[in-house]
Amino acid sequence: QLQGRASSILEEMRKASQQGISETAPPADAPVELIPASYEDAGPYEIDESVAVKLALENRLDLQVAIGSVYDAQRDVVVKADALRAGLTLGGSGQVADTDEDGSLRFDKGQYAALLSLDLPVERTRERNEYRNSLISLEQAARSVQSLEDQIKFSIRSELRTLLESRESLKIQAQAVVVAEKRVRSNTIFLEAGRTEIRDLLESQDALLAAQNSLTRAVVDYRIAELELQRDLDLL
């Protein structure tokens, strides 16, 4: 699909060259106008930035793991806070050995014991330290999530810009191939007419080969940028 898009761009450049559009040059003193990149011929992964960030935050497994660590830290804080409270323990035991003639148990002749213990919050140094450590761990987990979210947003925005730059580079390299092809044709005609040397034709052919290689690299760079975006969206 990407190779077909590159071929389509190259064909459009060739048609424009045949119509003489590429030969029209502005005056030397004309002001420089930077034309913003258009999204009309954007690729399938050049989506809106807000949509891309939303997809990444929903699908990234490492982010879900980090959020789960925050929940674990919150539960640990609750457990450590509960350890600072007073404790009341009620225990008991019973033993029945006698039975009636029919084999039924005699609960009225059993032995029973009960235990009631009260743990007052008098000395809680260890528990207090564990509670403070759990709060620190919770803050660290929350900061890790925020840092990872910022990193994901930065990566997505950067890769969308890389996609746009790669597509514009693809257009430029396609135009360079068209110019190099015109130069080869012109030098071929001039050589047949005796108006140039074979060295000029060979140099133009080398320039055409270099332009074609640059176009291929631009196609590869665009595809790599697409794969990197899919990877960071966790959709690869």
Image (cartoon, helix red, strand yellow):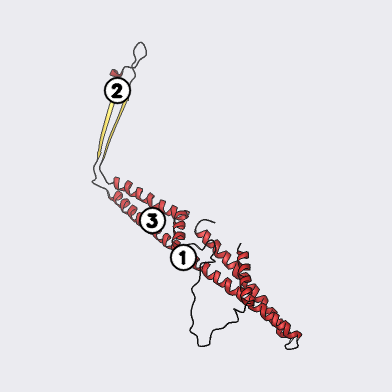
Residue type pointed to by label 3: Ala
Q: Identify the residue position indicated by label 1 in the image.
A: 157
Residue 211 at x, y = what percent?
64, 75
Quadrant placement of the C terminus: bottom right
The numbered mark at residue 141 is 3
Q: Is residue 197 left or right of residue 83?
A: right
Residue 116 at x, y = what percent?
25, 34
Whole-angstrom CA distance, mark 1 to mark 3, is 25 Å
Badge 1 crowding class, 10 Å Cα cut-off, few under 14, some 14 to 19, many 20 or more, is: some
Q: Is residue 207 visible?
A: no
Pick the residue in front: 188 or 62: 188
- Between discs 2 and 1, the one toward the N terminus: 2
Q: Identify the residue position indicated by label 2 in the image.
A: 111
* Circle 2: element type: strand
Pick the residue in front: 219 or 193: 193
- Between discs 2 and 3, the one toward the N terminus: 2
At a point 55% along the width and 69% down the height, the residue shown is: 167
Whole-angstrom CA distance, mark 2 to mark 1, is 75 Å
Q: Give the label, 1 or 3, closer to the camera.
A: 1
* Circle 3: element type: helix
Residue 19 at x, y = what percent?
62, 77
**How many numbered marks appear?**
3
